[in-house]
Image: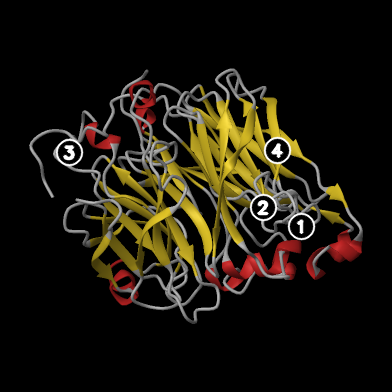
Amino acid sequence: MAQWMPDPTFYPSPKMAMEAPPEKYAFLVLLNPTHEGKHDALAVVDLDSSSSKYGQVVGQVEMPNAGDELHHFGWSACSSCLAPYAPHAHMERRYLVVPGIVSSRIHIIDTKPDPRKPRIVKIIEPEELARRTGYSRPHTVHCGPDGIYVSALGSPSGDGPGGIFMMDPESFDVLGQWELDRGPQHLAYDFWWHLGCDTVISSEWGTPKTFEKGLIPEVLLSSGYGHALHVWDLRRRRHQQVLDLGKEQQLVFEVRPAHNPAESYGFVGVVVSLKDLSASVWMWHRDNGKWGIRKIIEIPAEPADPEMLPPMLKGFKAVPPFVTDIDLSLDDRFLYVSCWGTGEFIQYDVSDPFNPRKTGSLHLGGVVRHAAHPKKPDQPLNGGPQMVEISRDGRRIYFTNSLYGAIDDQLYPEGMKSWMVKVNARPEGGMELDRNFFLEFDGLRSHQVRLDGGDASSDSYCYPS
């Protein structure tokens, strides 16, 4: 819906966004891994510390069909609407674009006038997505200066290539493939951009046939999953460069560019190395007009008794960290890293992005450790730190424990009980679990979190701080 004044939650710079009022609500996708009984849902969590319902689910909308596997989602409009070359300041942060990664069905959900009562206003069926784009399995959603961008992991048959498609931000019609020339790019996963450089960075997972029933060991051990980043010309929609991390680096996942549009670097997490089961974080950067990449963080696997490991890990006698998500604070100072396998959640000071410093660590869940939350110290947890979201001021971090239904069952075959927690971060570095914030879900699994008014992975800023 158009309005006459810019949305007050659009901010020209990350610094101005950091000065915004604290978040009051979290929107959270929940999936039903059995596809029976309750359908997947979008839940609303009260985050207003003065509320009597603080830390509780205060609203929920259930999807009309079974088996969507709600995964990643995003706003239809954000601070990028203030871009000087394509201003759309009349847009409103109101609608959430919520795809099902298994069904390829896209839900448009209205969060106003009452965010506690979201409602579905449009559904795009998978046949429509396939007809207009040739893609399926929509994944990352980003509101851009000129529309909604969505990555897709493959074709309707479950093969490649995957890529990016665009949607109209007002009608929510699917417009078509974004790429005019994809070059050698075949695999897709996450993407984001440097608006100041007119550059898109995309990452790689695998084709749907290679992950929908869980990771396939033969594909993994033969380096068959993604191990590269792709650099694109944002305006001309053409492939420019491959940044290959090497075949031993498997599952190149979440990309987090610097929020300051004057900077030209960013970070990507790699789930596992075939050399030693370690995980890593790499930094891309531009130097003399050319993009390069280097490893800046390596997290080793932890030796473990095979009797305590799931079948797919017993032969390795170790539990890999499995870095499945990373997130960068709006001041570009702190990078948070989820180690879904070992259950560690790590904070790094990346003020010098070439030389990060570890400034905080905590454990929750984990394949072997099963670390408990302080609110229920006698209750072992499974799953581990997974999808991370940071408040605009960087003081509160929220994360959940489910990765993807079929892969949850491979690493945690005992059955996953899902939860969401909050971490309090200190301005100078360091963090601790909020002892009173521990939200559990009955039968459903929690995945990505979005905060009302924007968060550290939702918005792109057009002006330097």
Q: CA distance from mark 1 to mark 3?
A: 46 Å
Which callout, 4 or 1, points at the residue further toward the start of the chain? 4
Residue identifier under label 4: 362
Residue 124 x/y as whole percent = 28, 69
Which callout, 1 or 3, points at the residue further toward the start of the chain? 3
Q: CA distance from mark 3 to mark 4?
A: 41 Å
Q: Residues within 10 Å of mark 2 (few under 14, many from 20)?
A: many
Residue identifier under label 1: 367
Q: Quadrant of the C terminus?
A: top left
Residue identifier under label 2: 384
Which callout, 1 or 2, points at the residue further toward the start of the chain? 1
Residue 179: in sight, yes or no? no
Residue 292's image quarter? Answer: top right
Helix, strand or loop at disc 4? strand
- Residue extending farthest left: 4
Q: Residues within 10 Å of mark 3 (few under 14, many from 20)?
A: many
Q: Amino acid at mark 4?
A: Leu
| Front in this rendered view, residue 285 or 403 | 403
Q: Are marks 1 and 2 in contact (CB under 8 Å)?
A: yes
Residue identifier under label 3: 88
Which callout, 4 or 2, points at the residue further toward the start of the chain? 4
Residue 144 x/y as whole percent = 30, 43
Q: Residues within 10 Å of mark 4 (few under 14, many from 20)?
A: some
